[in-house]
Amino acid sequence: MIRSLCLVYIFIFSFASVLDAQEQQQVRTRMNPELRRRALDIEINARVLTAEQDVIWDEHERRIAIPGSPVGIRLVGSNLIVSVQFTPIIQRQGNVLVAQGQIWIEEPGIGVSYYTSIQTIPMEFNEPIYFFPLGASDSKIEIIVTVSPYRDAAAGETGAATENENQ
């Protein structure tokens, strides 16, 4: 597949998220009690793998979000850009993680191709969700997302009120 061949040319990746670490600290400090009670901790681990499944690049980020608000990441290579937003939704009938992806690939002799996807993935707290922006059959890039109730260790408070309280 052409997308597989394009990954061979990826040399430099950068990992960007919606908020940087300093902004995240400010959010923790300013968060009002009602938001803190509903807050979620989103852990994102993005990896690039070789054909033999060896990890050649690994980046780990942790973000705070309120249900319904997206957390985004961007992976940038020499011929590939992957932009994904994850939106946790907490409901009585079951929690879901909405993953919206956009991919730009420069393919030799063809030009730039654009792909987009949206997936609604059932979610349980503290369980990893594997997301493959290029598809499961081409799993050279994988993003692992784990959503947990926010825990403010300094205040001894736990976020993400029970589902019954949220509805």
Image (cartoon, rainbow, N blue to C red):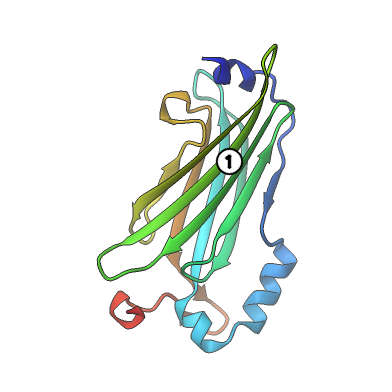
Quarter of the image for residue 159 reads: bottom left
Q: Could you say where residue 17 lies in the image, as x and y percent from the top left?
A: 66, 54
Q: Position of residue 150 (x, y in %)?
A: 48, 72
Q: Looking at the image, can residue 156 be seen?
A: no
- Does residue 66 appear in the picture of this structure? yes
Q: In front here: 61 or 67? A: 67
Q: Count how many numbered circles sit on residues in the image.
A: 1
Tell me the kind of residue under disc 1.
Gln
The front one of 4 and 60 is 4
Nearer-the-camera pick, 58 or 118: 118
User: For mark 1, does the 10 Å Cα neighbourhood hold few (<14), some (14 to 19), or many (20 or more) residues?
Assistant: some
Q: Quadrant of the C terminus?
A: bottom left
Q: Quadrant of residue 96?
A: bottom left
**The furthest residue to the bottom:** 33
Seen in the picture, residue 154 relative to 5 is either above or below; the reply is below
Say which residue appears at 37% left-offset and 62% top-offset.
125
Residue 89 in percent (x, y) is at 41, 64
Q: Which residue carries the number 1 mark?
A: 102
What residue is drawn where x is 63% and y is 19%?
6
